């Protein structure tokens, strides 16, 4: 396996930290979850549902 130079690791680390700061991973997960729900014929946006213990 080819070794990466220290400079390239600093570049990768810097980009990763910027993506985390911009919350890009959270946005990506929201998009993927929405696509999965559409694929399963579910609502595209989840809704909170509360049930009473009496109903159950």
Image: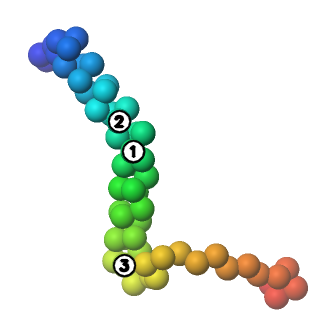
Q: Residues within 10 Å of mark 2 (few under 14, many from 20)?
A: few
Image coordinates for residue 8, horizontal then vertical, percent:
19, 19
- The structure residue drawn at horizontal position 13% and vertical position 17%, both measured from the top left corner, is 1
Q: Earlier in the sequence, mark 3 or mark 2?
A: 2
Q: Nearer the viewer, mark 3 or mark 2?
A: 2
- Give the residue number, with chain letter if any, for mark 2: 18
Q: Between marks 3 and 2, how big is the CA–CA gap?
A: 30 Å
Please tell me whether mark 1 sits on a helix, a strand or a loop. loop
Q: Nearer the viewer, residue 29 or 39?
A: 29
Give coordinates of residue 38: x percent, y percent.
37, 78
Mark positioned earlier in the residue sequence (3 or 1): 1
**Which type of secondary structure does the marked residue at label 2 adopt?**
helix
Identify the coloring.
rainbow
Q: CA distance from mark 3 to mark 1?
A: 26 Å
**Badge 1: how crowded within 10 Å, few (<14), some, or many (20+)?**
few
Q: Position of residue 22 (x, y in %)?
A: 39, 45
Q: Could you tell me which secondary element the residue under label 3 belongs to?
A: helix
Number of the label disc, if any, that sits on residue 22: 1
Q: Which residue is at 53% across, 75% downward?
A: 46
10 Å crowding of disc 3: few (<14), some (14-19), many (20+) = few
Residue sitting at the far right: 54
- When the figure is inspected, residue 43 is found, relative to residue 34, above or below; the finding is below
Quick check: 9 above or below 29?
A: above
Q: Which residue is mark 3?
A: 38
For residue 2, side relative to residue 20 (left or right): left
Mark 2 and mark 1: Cα distance apart in space: 6 Å
């Amino acid at each position: 396996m080819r070794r990466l130079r220290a400079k390239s690791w600093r570049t990768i680390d810097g980009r990763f930290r910027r993506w985390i700061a911009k919350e890009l991973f959270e946005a990506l997960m929201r998009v993927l979850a929405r696509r999965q729900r559409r694929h399963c014929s579910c609502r595209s946006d989840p809704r909170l549902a509360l049930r009473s213990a009496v109903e159950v």
